[in-house]
Amino acid sequence: MTIHTLQERHRFLEMLAVWQGYVRNKDLVDQFSITRQQAYQDIRAYQEQHPERLKKMVSGPYQFSAQYLFEAPKHSLEHYLQWFSTGQFYAPQSSFNAALGEHSSVPQRYVAPQVIAALTAAIRQQKRLELGYVSLSNPEWEGRIFHPHTLVKTGLRWHVRGYCEKSQGYRDLVLSRCRGDVELLDASEHTKEDDLVWNTQVVLIFAPDPRLNDEQKEVIAHDYQMENGQLRITTRAALVDYLLKEMQVKTHYLEGTPEAQQLILVNPRDVKPWLFER
């Protein structure tokens, strides 16, 4: 049986208060399998440590004060999105031993807490919402009616997948490009089950660049534990383009040297219908 410390439960409480927009006794009960009395005591202990930070609302949940919400550390966003997607909570503390090695860190893209709270609420309640969005192709702020169904981690950034009324189809929105106030609307008529591209499975077949010599091919094959010189990955059609980028495999041209290319896609015709740029 896993023993959860009070500190860990307090970190979970903080994470929900920032990114979900509120926290309830029930959230602690469900996550840590503790009693309601223990959850109440945990929240009271947190309030005693931080008397001006967490306030009980008339409707029941607890919320952070506006000032602390603005100042709250944003590093827990990754942990919240992982928890929302998987139900697994990893306390934002590293067990990495710096004496044994080092790792690089990449700056996270900023996402407003109110955007995350509204998106996750809409997904849970299967509602559509109105939000502002910008992109490189259209950097001017514009309103969109969106029906979100899934949060998706692709490489270094998060997207939300859903139906866009402006585009009249299922699209991915980059979370850091959702702007302004977000308003929950009525029930969504466009569900995850209706998203054909999301529900289509595609097999991508990778192999070492044929320009490599046999010894070099063996190095690549061992890296990925290939079978018969091939690596097969099954993914959703909606994620094909992202997977290719993460594997650093280009489909329209080869790098100048095989050492730079390393991998090729063996079945580009099977994959082409699902690429953003065909």
Image (cartoon, rainbow, N blue to C red):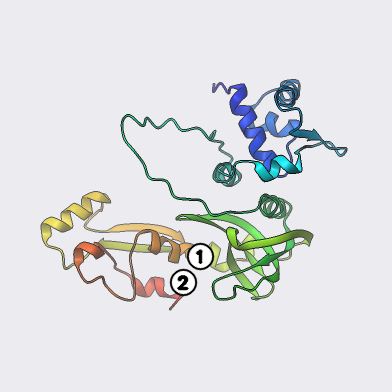
Position in image of residue 124 (x %, y %)? 70, 50
Residue denoted by label 1 = 238
Position in image of residue 35 (x %, y %)? 72, 22
Residue at image x 25%, y 65%? 261
Q: How many marks?
A: 2
CB within 8 Å, label 2 to label 1? yes
Specify which label sits upstream in the sequence, 2 or 1: 1
At label 2, counting other C-alpha atoms closer than 10 Å, the crowd grade (few under 14, some 14-19, many 20 or more) is some
**Residue 137 location, quadrant:** bottom right
Position in image of residue 36 (x %, y %)? 75, 24
Q: CA distance from mark 2 to mark 1?
A: 7 Å
Residue at image x 46%, y 71%? 274
Task: Give amino acid for label 1.
Answer: Ala
At label 1, counting other C-alpha atoms closer than 10 Å, the crowd grade (few under 14, some 14-19, many 20 or more) is many
Relative to the observer, which residue lies in front, 144 or 85? 144
Asked if residue 208 shows in the view, the reply is: no
Residue denoted by label 2 = 274
Asked if residue 31 shows in the view, the reply is: yes
| 242 relative position to 34: left or right | left
Residue at image x 53%, y 35%? 92
Question: Disc 1 on helix, strand or loop?
Answer: helix
Relative to the observer, which residue lies in front, 213 or 195? 213
Task: Give amino acid for label 2.
Answer: Trp
Residue located farthest toward the right when viewing the structure as drawn: 58
Residue located farthest toward the bottom when viewing the structure as drawn: 278
The answer to whether residue 270 is above or below residue 183 is below
| 157 relative position to 18: left or right | left
**Residue 27 location, quadrant:** top right
